[in-house]
Amino acid sequence: MIAAADRLGIEMLCLSALEAIFADYRTGNERIARAMLEYPGRVRGYVVVNPHYPEDILPEIERCFAAAPFIGLKFHPAGHEYPPDGPAYEAALGYAHEHGLVVLSHNWGSADYLDRVSQRYPRAHFIQAHSAAAWRGTAPLDYLRVAKTRPNVFLDLALSMAWYGALERAVADAGSEHLLFGADAAFLEPAVAVGRIAFAQIPEQD
């Protein structure tokens, strides 16, 4: 992944570990901590929060932040089979608000919930992952409305498929300042994500 980033001019990788989502959150978080220490300044990590162990959420977050320069928290409601608005996430959201952290979620559920939670925790920064993954760009996308109206809400572009014209529509509807580059590596070659933006029909400043 570092070699691919070097080839494409990507300066920093922001990562979470798959095994932290689907198998063992402590082991996966430790893998990302080691990567940050091995590649200082090139790798930054998200602490994966597992809502099925609510008593360990805050201790695990604090343990990880003491070990390496994590940038925020990662929720994966689909992988954990837990609702995005479930009560077990509240402690993590409160911690993110207190410390001004990023919270990246595979899915925030409804746009209305993302709107409410971003208001409730205004010092946290919320990212809706894969925002355009299944969006054709031909109909309104409620997440774009929230990103446009909430300064602490962002959408990332990591995806496994892309509809023609959807990126251009997202820039027009939400503004490029609320869209974040994402490659979905190592599932995909990150050059795909770079090319999608480089050849998009959007203004150079966007």
Image (cartoon, rainbow, N blue to C red):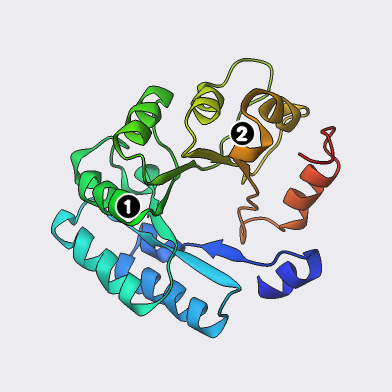
Picture quadrant of residue 110:
top left
Disc 2 crowd, CA 10 A, few/some/many (<14, 14-19, 20+) = many
Give x and y (percent) for residue 52. 21, 52
User: Which residue lies under the disc numbered 2?
Assistant: 132
Farthest-out residue, left: 55
User: Which residue lies under the disc numbered 1?
Assistant: 96
**Does residue 161 appear left or right of residue 95 in this picture?**
right
Instruction: Name the one closer to the observer, 98 or 36.
Output: 98
> What residue lies at 19% left-to-right and 40% top-to-bottom?
87
Q: Is residue 201 above or below residue 89?
A: above
Q: What SS does tag 2 mark?
A: loop
Give x and y (percent) for residue 120. 29, 34
Give x and y (percent) for residue 143. 51, 27
Instruction: Name the one closer to the observer, 167 or 22.
Output: 167
Picture quadrant of residue 67:
bottom left
**Does residue 204 appear left or right of residue 14 in this picture?**
right
Farthest-out residue, top: 139
Residue 24 in view here: no
Residue 110: which disc? none
Q: Amino acid at mark 2?
A: Ala
Give x and y (percent) for residue 25. 32, 65
Disc 1 crowd, CA 10 A, few/some/many (<14, 14-19, 20+) = many
Q: Is residue 48 above or below residue 192?
A: below
> What residue lies at 34% left-to-right and 71% top-to-bottom?
65
> What residue lies at 68% left-to-right and 22% top-to-bottom?
137
Q: Amino acid at mark 1?
A: Ala
